[in-house]
Image (cartoon, grey):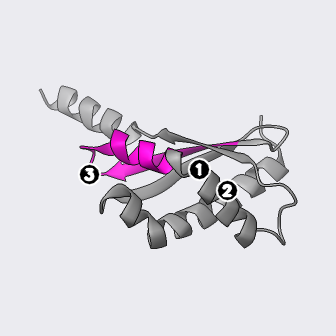
Amino acid sequence: MTTTRQNKVSRLLQKELGDYLQRTGSGLTGGKMVTVTVVRISPDLGVAKIYLSIFPGDGAEEALQAISGKAGLFRKEMGNRLRNQLRHIPELAFFLDDSLDYIDRIENLLNE
């Protein structure tokens, strides 16, 4: 069960990370489109699990590794952007959101 504060922080991080990745993420991912789909915050607001959808799907793992390698840079940038809204910026952990692949696989199975 998430609290109101967790929801507010997760929405704020999702919006700012999405904006930052839109502006600077193409250099990291080799031109792939990256979308921040879900941000989940731990109850103590210390860790943020960020789920990314990367299109096209081939090479998504490499793009995720490139983004995960720069997690410290992203955290610093979020600190600069959100210094007036948040006192502490949570640790960022990036994960691949494969829900679109899952939906596509189910549709293919239903069509067969």
* Residue type marked 2: Arg
Q: Secondary structure at mark 2?
A: helix
* Residue type marked 3: Pro
| Residue lying at 36% horizontally and 39% vertically, measured from the top left | 61
Give the residue pinned by disc 3: 56
Q: Secondary structure at mark 1?
A: helix
* Closer-to-camera residue (33/108): 33
Q: Secondary structure at mark 3?
A: loop
Give neighbour class at mark 1: few <14, some 14-19, many 20+ (Cα, 10 Å). some
Whether pointer 1 and pointer 3 mark residues with C-beta atoms closer than 8 Å, the reply is no
Distance Cα–Cα, label 2 vs label 3? 26 Å
- Residue 78 located within the stretch drawn in magenta: no
- Residue 65 located within the stretch drawn in magenta: yes
From the top left corner, tell me how far across and down residue 17 is, in percent.
58, 61
| Residue lying at 74% horizontally and 64% vertically, measured from the top left | 79
Distance Cα–Cα, label 1 vs label 3? 22 Å
Whether pointer 1 and pointer 2 mark residues with C-beta atoms closer than 8 Å, the reply is yes
**Residue 5: mark in rendering:** none
- Give whichever of discs 1 and 3 has the lower sequence position: 3
97 relative to 24, above or below: above
- Give whichever of discs 2 and 3 has the lower sequence position: 3
Q: Quadrant of residue 28?
A: bottom left
From the top left corner, tell me how far across and down residue 42 is, in percent.
76, 38
Give neighbour class at mark 2: few <14, some 14-19, many 20+ (Cα, 10 Å). some
**Residue 75: mark in rendering:** 2
Lateral position of residue 57 relative to residue 15, left or right: left
Distance Cα–Cα, label 1 vs label 2? 6 Å
Q: Quadrant of residue 31?
A: bottom left
Give the residue pinned by disc 1: 71
Span shown in magenta:
48-68
